[in-house]
Image: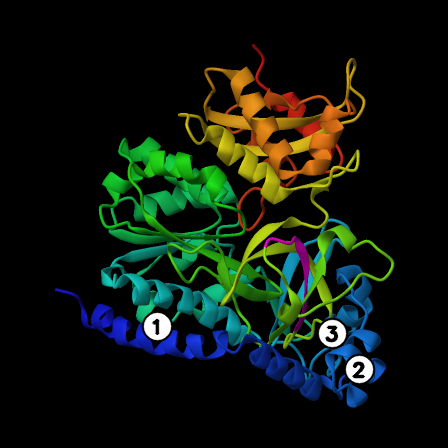
Amino acid sequence: MPSFKAALSKPFAKYVAKRIQKWSTRPVETQQKVFENLISKAKHTAFGKDHNFESITTYAEFKKNVPIRDYEELKPYVERVVAGEEDILWKGKPLYFAKTSGTTSGAKYIPITKESMPTHIEAARNAILMYIYETGHSKFVDGKMIFLQGSPILEEKNGIKLGRLSGIVAHYVPKYLQKNRLPSLETNCIEDWETKVEAVVDETINEDMSIISGIPSWVQMYFEKLIEKSGKPVGELFKNFNLFIFGGVNYEPYRAKFENLIGRKVDSIELYPASEGFFAYQDKQQERGMLLQLNSGIFYEFIEAEHFFDENPKRITIADVKLSVNYVMIISTTAGLWAYNIGDTVEFTSLKPYRVIVSGRIKHFISAFGEHVIGKEVEQALKDATAKTSIAVNEFTVAPQISPEEGLPYHEWLIEFENEPEDEAALIEALDQSLQQQNSYYLDLIEGKVLRPLKVTKIKKDGFQTYMKSIGKLGGQNKIPRLSNDRKIADSMHQLKLTK
């Protein structure tokens, strides 16, 4: 017999689905309203005055007045906000700063405002409600739920609270879910990731877990420790666990491993959250891609990735995007980010409604020889190569080897296997063939004898965790880049390779 809460979730899910359909079937009109609202509300800010918002009435005028910026270029404005000034990027002061570790900027402070904060919460909620609406499954709301996340302890800087995004969001879990939610606040506040996971295992191992959520690589660590302690697959330990919610990375490279750890298949929902905004979530179980949030105070622009580094790359709105093109996503938001490059690349899988997949990072690619291989391509190659085998991969990254001791240069794949391949040569050939089929530049370089086929370097068990720990990025929202255009990660990982 479903609880009152489970029964109530179905009509509420239907109501939310109708509201989503209303804006998703009027995408261009919806985005125009967001654009006009953003310009109107920010015209009296320091940024608005510096960029002539008072006279901007069209997207063409916006492009003319507001250049694309990344964090470094927006930093002078952000520093004024951090110093406590008001009306700089958005009216008033932000509620929070989401503090992230930038690679070139040191700590990044991403503002979250009174207007932008609710959109993070609503999108996470709506992802679950759309799942209930589509499948009719709602019993899971009565079970225990875990969200593996950063510490909710917040610091304060000039009257503004700051912390990790997941820690900030933890303060907004609805009251009706609080008693279902694990781990405890005390455990959630543990900073050391390995200590935290041990405590989470102790708190949850005897509970009725129904939803588990987090970045796949860190959930995997949690699952492995559960199995180690209980001697049972996760799906047997938690008989009502039927929904895995994840974000941050592509799940496909982990899927076989997870099904092995769980012992059965479970439904999953993919999310696309970031400190800068909650951009998309999976709204249909059988559709590829995530529904782009066009009604959440975010105005989107797109630039074809292959032209992004041109002198004047063409900027377009959703009205002009095409399927299967790799775009850099640019955002302007109610948090006061303007024509801001978050660094992600996306591809549209559907235009009715607009759905995207995250194809990679504009800074994470290999183009040491002009091949411009991206994250989506290496993930697809691994999926293709292991589709008909029992091989399971825990983690991997790819880097170019420009100056080998002998022979032609190549791409080096550093892989931590759960189940090693019986025929390594066949795996390498399958990986390389898939990459050649996806990327014509790579194919040309192989055929032109500029590159030789890729090489695989096997990494020790837990080698990637050891590496992440060594650079102070174990756990939380941290993740290993799928590929790099240099050998910084690869050379560090070599000391963790398997020796025969």
Label number found at residue 11: none
Q: Nearer the viewer, residue 383 or 350?
A: 350
Q: In this figure, what is the number of numbered marks?
A: 3
Which is the main secondary structure of the residues drawn in magenta? Answer: strand
What residue sits right under mark 2 in the picture? 46
313 inside magenta stretch:
no
> Which residues lie in the magenta part?
324-332
Between the C-alphas of marks 3 and 2, the distance is 11 Å
Label number found at residue 81: 3
Q: Amino acid at mark 3?
A: Val
Residue sitting at x 47%, y 42%: 252
Quadrant of the image for the C terminus? top right
Whether residue 242 is visible, yes or no, is yes
Q: Earlier in the sequence, mark 3 or mark 2?
A: 2
Q: Residues within 10 Å of mark 2 (few under 14, many from 20)?
A: some
Q: Amino acid at mark 2?
A: Ala
Whether label 3 touches label 2, CB < 8 Å = no
What residue sits right under mark 1 in the picture? 175
Q: Residues within 10 Å of mark 1 (few under 14, many from 20)?
A: few
